[in-house]
Amino acid sequence: MDRPGFRVRMVWLWGLVPAIALAEMVMQWRIPRQEPSSDEWKAAARAIGAEKGVNDLVVTAPAWATQGRMSLGALVPVADFGRFDTTRYDRVFEVSLNGARAPETEGLPVESEESFGRIAVRRYRLSPRATVLYDFMQHLGEAHRENGGYTNPVLMIDHWFNPRFVMPVPLKRRTVALTFENVPTGGVLRGYGLIGYRSGRFNKGGPVSLRVFVDGAHVGGASFRNFGPLEPFELALPGRQPATVRFEVSAVDNLSREFGLAADVRRKPGAAP
Amino acid sequence: MNEPFHTRRRAHHLVGLALAAASLASLLLSAKTLGYARDEGFYFVAARSYQRWFDVLFQEPGRAVTKPTIDRYWSYNSEHPAVMKTLFGFSNRIFTKKLGWLSPSTSFRLPGMLTAALCVYLIYLWGATVFGARAGFFAAAAFALLPRPFYHAHLACFDMPMTAFWLLVTYLYWRSLASWRLGLAAGVAFGFALGVKLNAAFMPLVLGFHYACLVAHRCLNRTGAGAPWPKPWAFLFGLVVAPPIFIGHWPWLWHDTLARLKEYVGFHSTHSHYNTAWFGENIIGAPTPLALPTVMTLLTIPTVVIALTLAGSLLRLRHHLPRFVERRLADACPPRGPVSTNGLDLLLLLTLVFPIALISLPDIPKFGGTKHWMPAFPAMAILAGAAASRLSDLAASLFSRFPAKAVGAFTVAFLLLAPLQQTITSHPFGLCSYVPLVGGAPGAASLGMTRQFWGYTTAGVLPWLNEHVPRGGTVFFHDTVAPSVEMFREEGALRRDIRSTDVRRSSFALLHHELHMIRNEAWIWNDYGTIVPAHVLTYQGVPIVSVYERPSGDGRPRPEMRGDE
């Protein structure tokens, strides 16, 4: 063994300890200085407000920076805030702190970027958005409700703690139905079902079933379970005349859970307007 | 170094007491800005209830010991024993009601702070007597400057007291291996430790294992044939004096003793799982992640202390290497520091590892940040102290142009700067603190770790509420329980006319950010019809408490989506 060499290595190894201490101090000093000021948030919001269109989405990265909502305000409508996906948007404005990226912008090329102190606003273009012919959420108040139901959509929390804007449907021993009149057809009925998160102790129970009827005919459905994947269901909606669409929701047990439904009718991809 | 064991004992006591006094002073001075933790609210109520029983005891002793009277005053919060709650109550009676020296909350908290000071004293005493004064100083100061334990040291809760009693019993047990008097003291301390919290019931496992190892070593080691046998006094006295102390201190056990003991043990053996965020997942049931206590320790204890603990452990391990390794290392890296007396190194290692290993078990509920394995931290600090002392010796030899004592003192002081900085900057957000090497609170938030718990951060938004809530206005205080809100009112931190209520009847609503609490935030969003907070309290840029204000003129009917939590 090279003993002097060994001793030198030991001294260097010990030298790591004060180096760690110093690094910790510098980092601890830097961390609070990376927090954007309210002026920086406001400047970013002003810039987005000047450019944002009605079909554009605003997201914050990292997602925990919820204080940004104070400045972004109406730039993030509730429906956008509780979106299931980005298929209804043209562009995304990403408000980024310290270089963070939002999952919605992963893999997308940056169209433009502007800095406001410690905040960067980046713009991305999404794939061509879906043309929505009818949004059931906007017509919930007019829907005919059987065995309960609510008149306005709410934000419900999914099992991964994301807020989702849905039509709340109470789970009961009897089937609960929502019926919408004069729904345009000739497209695709697309939607999401969601069993809302309650608490670990209550996230039990069998599946929740959704059945969809068009003018009285059963056209399809979906089944949802606790912690199940959040995937859209799609049903073809043939015909040219407006139709009556009826959603039937039923569950066999643990009726204390919450169920939410988000759906629209959209033009088939590639179909002529 | 090789300082003889048990020398300069009086000086060690004096320095230890001075450090303890400094620790207590820092806690008293910094208590005002710290909101009341969820559990503190319950213990304020319990302490007052138990004091009312003492009133009866002083006036009508005969009536006080009857079952109906005991049940009336002692049934509240009977899932925990009463040593600390009784002390909280007496402290409040003496320092607030009689002397008027302290505010109600500070007097309730004083006994907990004293146990933190006791920790500092014992850590110095133990560290200094075995590894030298510099090691003891670093250990005591480093423990006092751990951000999360510093937070817990303020509270009228049981976690810091449990840490202090665990350390006290362990230290006395170690000393009792050669003294029956200290064995008696260990037995008495163990009785009171049982009266602090259930965790103490696990101590005989650790100490018993240690003792068995000592006896086995004594039997197997022929060269030590003439050495005295380790004395089992602590166990004998523990068996004799601890049970009567435990039952005697807690009037609730005086009637139906066996049934109530069973109820007490049953409550904890089937303890509910509470929510803990773990890399973006919400843990609320078995099996819980094995690595959680270890990872949380690494993420919340200043990294320099972790590095020194590791170095200190290796330094001590150097004394216990097999002979073939010993022969290779002897010249290049001789063992430093005193030899292990009465299994000191094994005891420190067990004290460090056992609390963390116990909570790591997959069936054990994991919640409350790092508080349930805090008894590991004094041993961690002592081992870190041994390494800091060695490093300061090394620095003195490298910078031999300067006085060795000055270089040593400078080195120790420098190593304490990072914990000091983290503790100062994390106050009063102790439970939100994470080490800077993971990016502090923002880094932990991005990793999806627990942001806080116990709803204690309400104190940070009280000035805003006092300014913005109209006279007689209503506020939903979320995770801050009613007795804690009442304490804010009692101490003038919250305007007395501000009423506490539920979301639907409130004009303002608080949300303490935790992963699972977003469901509660959704109640507010849906009921208030807005997702835009009026005020957000942040720590290092991470939202801690959001305050929502109900938009004026908002009379829309809301769906009832609230449930069980």
Image: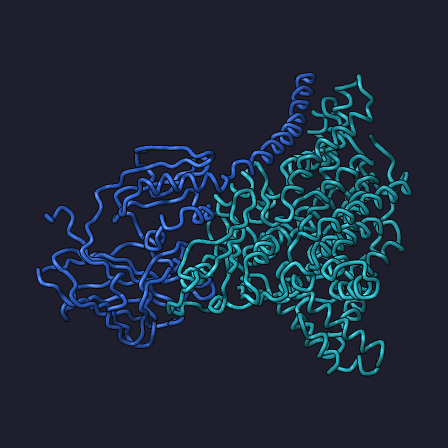
Chain colours: A blue, B cyan
Q: Nearer the viewer, residue A107 or B235?
A: A107
The quarter holding residue A178 reads bottom left
* Residue lying furthest left: A240
B383 sits to left or right of B5? left
Q: How many marks?
A: 0
B352, A73: nearer the viewer: A73
User: Where does residue B148 sit, x and y in percent of width and height?
Assistant: 65, 48
User: Between A200 and B266, which is closer to the camera in this rendering?
Assistant: A200
Q: Does B16 appear above or below B268?
A: above
Q: What is the quadrant of residue B145 in the picture?
A: top right
Taking A257 as reference, is A238 left or right? left
- The structure residue drawn at horizontal position 72% and vertical position 29%, both measured from the top left corner, is B326
The percent coordinates of residue B495 (x first, y second) are 63, 62
Query: What's the residue at 37%, 69% (across, down)?
Result: B557
In the rendered image, residue B497, in percent from the top left (x then y), is placed at 61, 66
Q: Is residue A180 among what the camera can see?
A: yes
Image quarter of the N terminus of chain B = top right
- Image location of residue B34, percent across then percent down: 66, 53
Task: Kindly tell me whether residue B287 is visible in this rendering.
Answer: no
Q: Residue at x 35, y 56 (%)?
A: A164
The answer to whether B315 is drawn above or below residue B216 in the figure is above
Position above or below: B392 against A47: above
